[in-house]
Structures are given as C-alpha cells and as structure tokens.
Image (tube, rainbow, N blue to C red):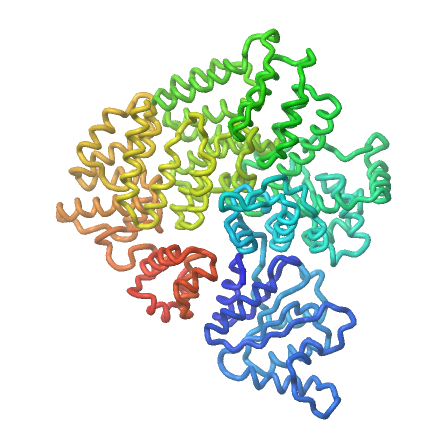
Amino acid sequence: MFEPTGAAASALRWIELGRDVLVRGDDGSGRTTALDTLVTSATEAGIHVLTVRAFRAPSTPALAPFLVHGLVQERPGARPSIGAIAQSLAEELQGPRNLLAVDDIDLLDDWSLLVVEELLRRTSARLAATLAGTTLDHTSAPVLRVLAHRAPAEVRVGALGLWDMASLIEHRLGGQPDLNLVAGVLARSGGHAGVALALTDAGRWSGSIESTGGMWRETSPLDDAPHDAVVNVLTRQLDPDQARALRLLSWVGPVSVRDAEALVGPPIVAGLLAGDRLATFPFASDELIMVNPPALAHGLNAQMTTQHLREVVAVVQSHFGDDYVARPTSGIDPSVSQNVSGNLLETEDRAWSSSTAALVLERTSAQRAARRAAWGDHPSVEHANRLLASLGAAPRTEEVRAIFDRTTIDGSETHGAVEQFDELRALWSRATGTAVPELSDRSLGPPRRQRLRERLGLIQSTIEAGRCQDALELLDDTEGVDSDLQAQFDAARTDALMFAGEPDQATYWARSRLSAAIDSLDKAAIQTHVGGLSGLLLLTGDYTNAFAPVSLALRLGPPGPFEDVPAERGLSIGAGLQARRGQISTAWVLLRELERYTSPAPHPFDVLPAWARAETHYAEGERAQGDGLLWRAGLAAAERGHIASAMLVWMAHAGTLDDHQLTIVEETYHPRQMPLFQPVLELQRALHSGPSDLVLQLLTRVGRAFGPAQSQALVERLNELRLGEGVPPMNQVEIGHATGRADQLTGRGSGPGTEAGVLTDRERQVALYARNGLSNREIASMLFVSVRTVESHMYRILRKLALSSRSDLSGWDPAVTP
C-alpha cells in the first residue's frame, strides 16, 4: 500500500491525542488510501477499527454502507432499522480504544449518517472520515452539522513533493525512475497522485516511458502519450457548464483572473478554483489563472472537436476581439515585478514551486508549438535555433535529425546565429554520439560568439584562480553579450562577489537575476542562477532558503541536450543540502542522478559532486570517509589551479586539519582577492592550540556555515581545549549560540540528550511508528525508505529525546515534545 504524503501518520497522531480527524483531498489524490493506511496503523497500535464506506451511485438504497456488514435481521426478509444497526455495531465499539473510519462521509445517505451520529453518541469511539468534496462549501448540510458538533482536526492529502512522487512512480513501475521522468510527471500532474499514475500508465502504453540501463526514463515527450485518463479522473464531478468553461480556459492558456471571469463568469471561476481545477499565480497587480494541473489542460485540448473549437473561438473573440483567432503561443508576458518572485524565494513553498514549474512548462509548450510551425514554414537557422532550444530533455530523435538535415543558410542569418546552430549541433553530437555536419559560413563575419565563450571561460578561470576582483573587472568590461549567454555571465558575477567576500551584494545580485529569470519563465536561466543563489545561501548557513530555488530547479527537470547548463551544480547542492537536513535517501537519489549528468566539458566548481558525497558520508556517521574525500578533491583542484574550489572543499572538512594539511592550505590560499574563507581558516589555526575563547569567538562568527557533522567535530575539539584549561564543557544553550543552530549535534561532554529536542516531521513519524511497536524494516517499508535511513532517524530521535533505547519511546508524549 502506498501512502506517500504522511497524511495517515498525521491523522494517527490526532487520534492518539483523542481528537477526531477529517482527511480531505482531491479526487484521486489518495485520501482513501490514506484512510486505509490509518486503519492499518491504528489496528497495529491496538485500536479496534470499524470501517464504513459510502456508495457513490445515486440509486444506492438507504443504509447500504451498513448492510454490507452482514447484520442480523430483526425478522426474515426485513431491512434492519437504524436502532438495530446502531445497537449491533455499538457493541463492537465498546472499550477504551475504538475508531470509526468513514470513507466519503459527505456521500452517505441521510439514514446512514444518522447511524454514524448514533454510534458516536453511544460509544467513546473517535471518528476518522474522508471528505469527497474538496471544500466545505460543497458539503451537504447534514454532514456539516455532524462535523461542527465533533469539531475534528483536519489533515489534507495535498500535492506530492519531488521525493514522494519518485517513490510513487517507483512503486507503480517496479523500478527506479530517473530524475527527468519524476520531474516531468510532477510538473504535469501538479503533484496529484491519481494524475501521476494515469500519466505513468499512459507513458508506458505509448512507449514514452521505457526501462533502459536499469532505470525508467522518458524516452520521448510524455505529452505525446494519451491524456484521456487524466481528464476522466479530474472532471467526473463537474457539471456541463464547468466542463465547457474548463475546456475553453484550457485552450486559451494562462490568462488574468479578470479575463477568465469575463470569459466564463465569476461563479464558474469560483467553483473551479474551489474544486482545485483552476489555480492562480501572482502576476504584477493581478493574478494569472490556469487550468490545474497542466496535464488536464493538455488532455482537454487533445479532445477538442471541430464543434468545440468553433464554440471556444466564438467566446474568445467576443471578449478579445475579432483579431483573436488562435491560441496565444508567444508565451506569458513577463510583467511580474521582481519583488513578487523575489519574496516567494524566501520559503520552500511547495505550491509556489509547483505553480512556477507549471507556468514555465506551459510557456515552453506554447513556444515549442509556435516555433515548430515557424520552422516548418521557413527552415531558417534563426527558427531552428529557437525550436531546438525549446525541445526539452527528451526530444524526438527523428525531429532533431530533420531539423539539422533541412535547415539551410538563406542569406538573412548573422554569423552569431550560425555559430549558435553549430554549438547546438555539437551538443547533440556529444549527447548522442552521432556526427552532424557543420553549417558554418565564414563569409558572415567574425566568430563573435566564440570570443564571448572564450571571455566567459577566462572570467570563470580567473574566479577559480582566486582572483575575484580581477574577474569583476573583466565582467564590467564585457559588452554585447547574446541574450542566451547573459545568464552565464550574470551567474559568474554572483560567484565573483561571493568569493570576494561581498555576501550582501552577491545575495542581492543573485536574487534579482533569479527573480528576473522566473518572471520571464526562462527555464535555462532559472537553472543557471539557482546554483549561484543556493550555493551562496548554503555558505552562509541558510539551509531552508537555500533549498527553495533548488526545489524549483529540480521540478523543472534536468537540462536538455540543447540547454548549455551544467546539471552538476544544482544536483550537488541539492544532494548536500538534503544530507545536511538528514534526508539521506533523497540525497542518494540525487547522487545517482549526478552520475548520469556529469559534463565532459570543464566547468566551474567541479568539486561540488565530491562535496555532496562527503556530506552524505557525514550524515551517515562516516566522518573519516567524508574528510578523506574532501581533502583529496581539494588537492586535485589545487593542482589544476582551481584555488576557489580547493578552499571550498577544504573548509567544509569536519575534522581538524593537521599541521601538514594546514600548511598546504595556507600556501594555496589567496587572501587578498578571496577573503570569504579567512574566518574559517583562522578557526582552523586556533583549533590546534587554542585558546578556547578564541575558538569560541571564531566559531560563533562562522558556525552557521557548517553542517551537523562539522559542528559536532568543532564542538568536540573546543570542549577538549576547555577541559585542558580547566573550563567546563559547553552546555546546550552555549552550543546552540556558538553554532547558530539549536538543532546541531552537540558533541562529547555536553551531557544527556546530545541534540535539541525538536524532531523533524519525518523523525516524529518514525518515532510514532516505533512507539507503536513497528520494527525498523516495517517502518522502512511503510515510508518507502531504506532500513539504514530509518536507523539513522532512530539514532537522532533517541539523542534528541535523551532516551537510551527505543523501548523508552513507550513513555514519550508527542504532545509535549515539539
């Protein structure tokens, strides 16, 4: 049974606290599965459960949900009365721990609902129910009366995140999917479990999803797969007016709320928003509205008949004017102020990430259709470049070959356009191992793009050499950069400012560039700037905000063969961040993806994959392996002249550097133009001989930049110095202040409970299962993680709760521990 969202675990926590719970969610989102998982977990916890399921058929007789329980009839051939049913079932619910589980309580007939009320009145059973309507506005009055009286807590079966989606697809396919497939299904489905499964099945049927090399991959665009099942899943409860409106808005594409209301009417828009069939996204002073999820819009458009099209065009032209004769294909007007997306970057907001990814993919899909048509009419180099850039991560091989074969120079192209075409040809040849003839025409002018590429390479190598101020001067002197290369130059400025010791300027610049990329819905630019901003936030210890842009980039999927964006940086930072956050299994998912996307061409900070693997070693308690990996990666980088990369991994070292290592670091370091690492290097010097006050002062200054393993090692060494000076070891409060994190590992000598008592959501989930008697293997099976991951969670849980063994969890009160 797959229940990826944790809704069942959340519901069980409420039940354990003596509170009724209402599980809500969209059709096909998994709310019934969540209730079934809750029933299983409650039964395993020693709670007696009586399950009742509503019938959706309108002609179902009254009390049908209870008649299937095989109740004894009062007399032969007679239907049991409400009183008899209540009396019989109430006897089942006697005792201190009972649960009445009702699936789709708002679909119960009035007589069955009266039985539920009577059972709850006669017994002390708790109620756990699912709600078929996504909002209480669509719920019948009798049910509202029951719910108002019981005042249940609510658990929402919401959109799946990236990792839950990966587990769901793996469960369906019986094998591991790659990141591109997971991201594609996630973006198209909006995280809706039922839609994701429909897309996965359709992809296998059509051949868009295949198992190659031991992994399931999107081998051709998933948009080519039939989407009829998606439409059936999401529109079965719509009335005819809502269905027509949704078809129209699917064809029009994202529009403002005002335009949507003018096209189909405010009540219908409100109803579709309430039912999650439409979603809004903030744009400037207004809101953009779009069909939710994108796969539904694609499916509805695919089902368009000639009559549907006539109706839609007539309505659209009546609002926009007679000149409006086709669906907009030029993309979304990039009119969002930078403050909008800039503020949204402050938190890891799943809804925002999903909406943004959906908008980017919608724009790309519209662009692809328009560019395909333009190139078909006129196969010029300019049109070919635009089309190739929009084909995504899984382009059709035959289409790419046709573009390279049929595109010709017609005399209107600039040399830059031809150079770009040859660059795309080279990228395709490198990705597929097939030779494609060059199109170069040297008579068109000097190789300007080649010079820009060389300039960019010089700037990046200057940063790597530790001469960041020189790199900034080179950037200031660079002019006339092509629009598709501008993001890479801007990202280089982020790196130069960061290593030059200007974190505030670097943060402002990186946020503004990423915000502009989001506002223009430019996938390649977003992925380029994510690495700079997330890396900067990581170095300053802002882990939560660092993962927000990474989350967005992962939802967009890896770069395609015609997007010159190194995938290693974003994947490495994502893996390292997940490891530092204790999400070891997801870190390994990204590390496996990282092995597939290693760029053969040189690129800045190619030590990041080694850093990510070291962080995973640290998270698994393998400090020596992590230290050794980082030290060797730094030596190799220094030999190449990549001083910035060498310092980056050396300063992430968890253990104290020995005298020989410290000498090498000091001889390599360039403090004049790269002051970022100066405080960390001073800390490493002080760790050798103290005094402890100096170590504490330096640790307080830079502590937030370290992960849990590094913090533990530093605190251990600091306490050794303090003991040698006759000073007591640091306590919890002092450690939290010094490291900048109350939840960091505290190290030896700090007494019982060597972590702060705040459990993460996943740790609390594991603790609840363990308290209820489940083994590590059983917990791993329920959470779809490895046994080793559960063991790591249990280790941290016991330390945080100051418990000596898992059996002590029997006395743990979840309501007391945060």
User: 227 left or right of 534?
Assistant: right
Q: Residue furthest front?
A: 434
Reply above or below: 23 against 482.
below
The N terminus sits in image quarter: bottom right
Q: Nearer the viewer, residue 408 or 89?
A: 408
* Image location (x, y in percent) of residue 803: 31, 64
Write the residue at 63% across / 31% down.
390
Reply above or below: 436 against 25.
above
**Residue 369 in sight in this render:** yes
* Image location (x, y in percent) of residue 602: 42, 25
Write the residue at 86% across / 44% down.
307
User: 436 left or right of 371?
Assistant: left
Among the 4 quarters of the image, the one containing residue 504: top left
Write the residue at 38% across / 36% down.
539
* Image location (x, y in percent) of residue 471: 41, 19
Q: Nearer the viewer, residue 804 or 685?
A: 804
Write the residue at 84% across / 33% down.
321
Reply above or below: 239 against 430.
below
**Residue 515 in sight in this render:** no
The C terminus sits in image quarter: bottom left
Q: How many marks?
A: 0
Among the 4 quarters of the image, the one containing residue 114: bottom right
* Image location (x, y in percent) of residue 129: 61, 69
User: 728 left or right of 64?
Assistant: left
